[in-house]
Image (cartoon, grey):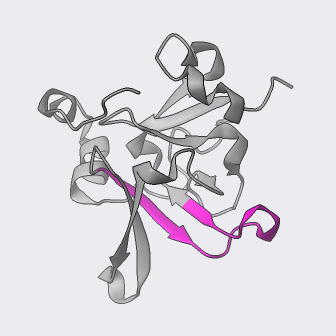
Amino acid sequence: MSKYEKRAEVVDSLSPEEFYVTQESGTERPGTGKLLNNKEPGIYVDIVSGEPLFASADKYESGCGWPSFTKPIEPAYVVDIEDRTLGMVRTEVRSKHGDSHLGHVFPDGPQDRGGLRYCINSASLRFIHRDDMEGEGYGEYLNQVEDAA
C-alpha cells in the first residue's frame, strides 16, 4: 500500500483554482470542470495526496454541473464533515490524507446504486486512465474499472 500524504511542494504547484477548491474549500463554477464529461475508464485520485477516491465505473451524469459518483473507491479515504455554510446543512467530503476539500455528498443519487450522489469538483481530482493505472501504482484497483467499450 502506498503512503498518501499532503506535501507542501504539491500544494505549491496547484493552479489558483485547484488551490482555492482543495485548500480553501471553494467550489468551481458548475459545468466548467475539466473532468465533468470524462467518460474514459480509470480512477480519480486526490490531486494533492494521490489517494484513490472514485472509479469511472461509479461515475454518472447527474445533471448537477459537477462530476458525480455513487460511491468512493476506498471509503476510508473519504471523510464526511457536517457543513453549515450557506445557511443550510450539507455533508462535505474531504480526502483523509490530503485533507483536500472534494465537494459534497447528497442522498439523491441513483437508488439502485445506493442512493448517494458524491458531487465532486474536478479541480480536486487527477484522472488516471486504466492503461496507466498499473504503472502509477494503482493496479490493485483495476478490478473496479469497467472494460473498454
State the extent of the magenta-drawn residues as a range: 100-118
Residue 24 in sight: yes
Q: Residue furthest right?
A: 149
Q: Is residue 21 above or below residue 41?
A: below
Residue drawn at x 80%, y 26% is 147
Q: Is residue 115 magenta?
A: yes
Report the side of 141 relative to 96 (left or right): right
Q: Residue furthest top?
A: 135
Report the side of 7 relative to 36 (left or right): left
Q: Quadrant of the C terminus?
A: top right
Residue 110: image quadrant is: bottom right
Report the side of 16 relative to 46 (left or right): left
The x, y position of residue 39, in whole percent, is 71, 35
Residue 98: image quadrant is: top left
Residue 71: image quadrant is: bottom right
Residue 40 in sight: no
Residue drawn at x 68%, y 35% is 144
